[in-house]
């Protein structure tokens, strides 16, 4: 359900019997290209989705943090800010509580007074579209604005990542929070995860008669749980064997030479994925800068093959999205996010979208899969205050 700010404010009033001081929104994201590259100091290129977490927030002065999500039947969680401590295995509220903890830990003592928070989000959870980062960044921006904290957007993103890593206990990279905090409408964000330098790259598929779609497969395979850590460790092992700090430091032009130094077939595949996907980000940026959005199509499909065959993080449903979309005339498609379920993106001529969408849906039906959810990936605004 999409609520406007006044409905969220009405719900806040009913819950807490007072007025919120404002409403803030932070979007989910989809990554165009550059997957699993962020923990290798590489490049990524996410865009913000129209789907966003929205929070109505009011400061408190008594040290209580009250948290409520209108999207789950869980009541109000009440915590003492002074007692916040990293705690694995907590509920949804560990994400916003972690943000308060990270702000405090970074010396922003103003947040110690506490807050009342009411959340609603249109970002599907667990679909690889970063509902968690949207939640963190919306709360982080609300507190930053209300307390006039001297934090830039990239700094806010780092604090939200710290909340997720150290407080919630999820070892995510920096892409999701940076995308939610820093993306701009009509652009993708070219982010160098080594030094966090970034550039807004114009991306307006509609203006070129194209459409970018998200296909949420609505599956999540248990296999994904340990796979992220295993790939991460494998990449670190590859860098160690090659004598580089991170796989980012392996030049694409010298990839065959580097691969020849590796004995382990699995490590070789991981290295090949990271180095080629990093290079695909550079190629994709060149296409967008040249206004050649159609040139992005084959790069996406190549990226999918690499994730499927080299990194091996795809699954039958994601492979089916890509194969059925491309067979129905899409320019390109790939899984996006961590894989083993979640979402894919598809680039197609706008007038081919009905045929591509129905090809994907009927392929899912034929294979007996749950119907996927499709929506346009319109490059949208990053986190903001709602008037
Ligand atoms: P993703 O970020 O890919 O959607 P994660 O597993 O990282 O998946 O984060 C999902 C978690 O974030 C949920 O399990 C829940 O704890 C929290 N979350 C996200 N959106 C909401 C919401 N609207 N209400 C409550 N919790 C939410
Ligand atoms: Mg997440």
Image (tube, rainbow, N blue to C red):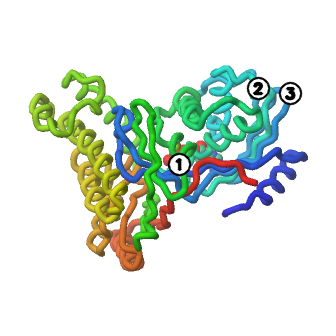
Question: Vertically, is 349 above or below 297?
Answer: below
In this image, 343 relative to 154: left or right?
left
In front: label 1 or label 2: 1
Q: CA distance from mark 3 to mark 1?
A: 35 Å
Label number found at residue 14: none
Image coords of residue 48 (percent x, y)? 52, 53
Disc on the earlier residue, 1 or 2: 2
Q: Residues within 10 Å of mark 2 (few under 14, many from 20)?
A: some
Residue 366 or residue 361, whichever sits in front = 361
In front: label 3 or label 1: 1
Residue at coordinates 74% horizontally, 40% vertically from top-left? 67
Label number found at residue 183: 1
Residues at discs 2 and 3 in contact (Cβ within 8 Å): no
Image coords of residue 3 (percent x, y)? 71, 61
- Residue at the disc numbered 2: 110
In this image, 300 relative to 71: left or right?
left
Does residue 6 show up? Answer: yes
Check disc 1 and report its element: helix, strand or loop. loop
- Residue at the disc numbered 3: 62
Disc on the earlier residue, 2 or 3: 3
Q: Residues within 10 Å of mark 3 (few under 14, many from 20)?
A: few
Image coords of residue 350 (percent x, y)? 41, 75
Mark 2 within 8 Å of ligand 1, using the beta carbon: no
């Amino acid at each position: 359900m999409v609520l406007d700010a006044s409905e969220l404010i009405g719900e806040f009033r009913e819950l807490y019997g007072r007025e919120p001081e404002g409403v803030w929104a932070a979007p989910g994201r989809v990554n165009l290209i550059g997957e699993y590259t962020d923990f290798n100091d590489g490049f990524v290129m996410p865009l913000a989705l129209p789907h966003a977490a929205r929070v109505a927030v009011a400061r408190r002065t008594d040290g209580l943090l009250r948290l409520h999500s209108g999207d789950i039947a869980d009541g109000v969680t009440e915590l003492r800010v002074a007692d916040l401590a990293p705690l694995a295995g907590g509920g949804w509220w560990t994400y916003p509580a972690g943000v308060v903890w990270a702000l405090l830990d970074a010396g922003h003592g103003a947040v110690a007074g506490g807050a009342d928070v009411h959340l609603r989000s249109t970002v599907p959870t667990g679909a690889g579209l970063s509902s968690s980062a949207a939640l963190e960044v919306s709360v982080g921006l609300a507190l930053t604005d209300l307390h006039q904290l001297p934090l830039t957007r990239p700094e806010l993103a780092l604090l939200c990542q710290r909340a997720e890593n150290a407080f919630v206990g999820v070892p995510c990279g920096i892409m999701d929070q940076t995308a939610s905090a820093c993306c701009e409408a009509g652009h993708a964000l070219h982010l160098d995860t080594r030094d966090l330098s970034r550039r807004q790259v114009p991306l307006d598929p509609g203006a070129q008669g194209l459409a970018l779609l998200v296909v949420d497969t609505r599956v999540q395979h248990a296999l994904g749980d340990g796979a992220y850590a295993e790939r991460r460790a494998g990449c670190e092992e590859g860098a160690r064997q090659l004598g580089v700090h991170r796989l980012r430091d392996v030049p694409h032009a010298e990839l065959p030479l580097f691969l020849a130094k590796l004995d382990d077939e699995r490590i070789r595949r991981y290295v090949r994925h990271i180095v080629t996907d990093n290079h695909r980000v550079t190629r994709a940026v060149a296409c967008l800068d040249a206004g050649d959005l159609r040139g992005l199509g084959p790069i996406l499909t190549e990226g999918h093959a690499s994730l499927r065959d080299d990194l091996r993080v795809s699954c039958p449903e994601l492979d089916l999205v890509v194969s059925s979309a491309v067979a129905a005339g899409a320019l390109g498609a790939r899984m996006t996010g961590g894989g083993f379920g979640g979402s894919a993106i598809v680039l197609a001529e706008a007038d081919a979208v009905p045929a591509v969408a129905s090809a994907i849906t009927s392929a899912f039906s034929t294979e007996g899969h749950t119907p996927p959810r499709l929506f346009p990936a319109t490059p949208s605004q990053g986190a903001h205050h709602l008037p």
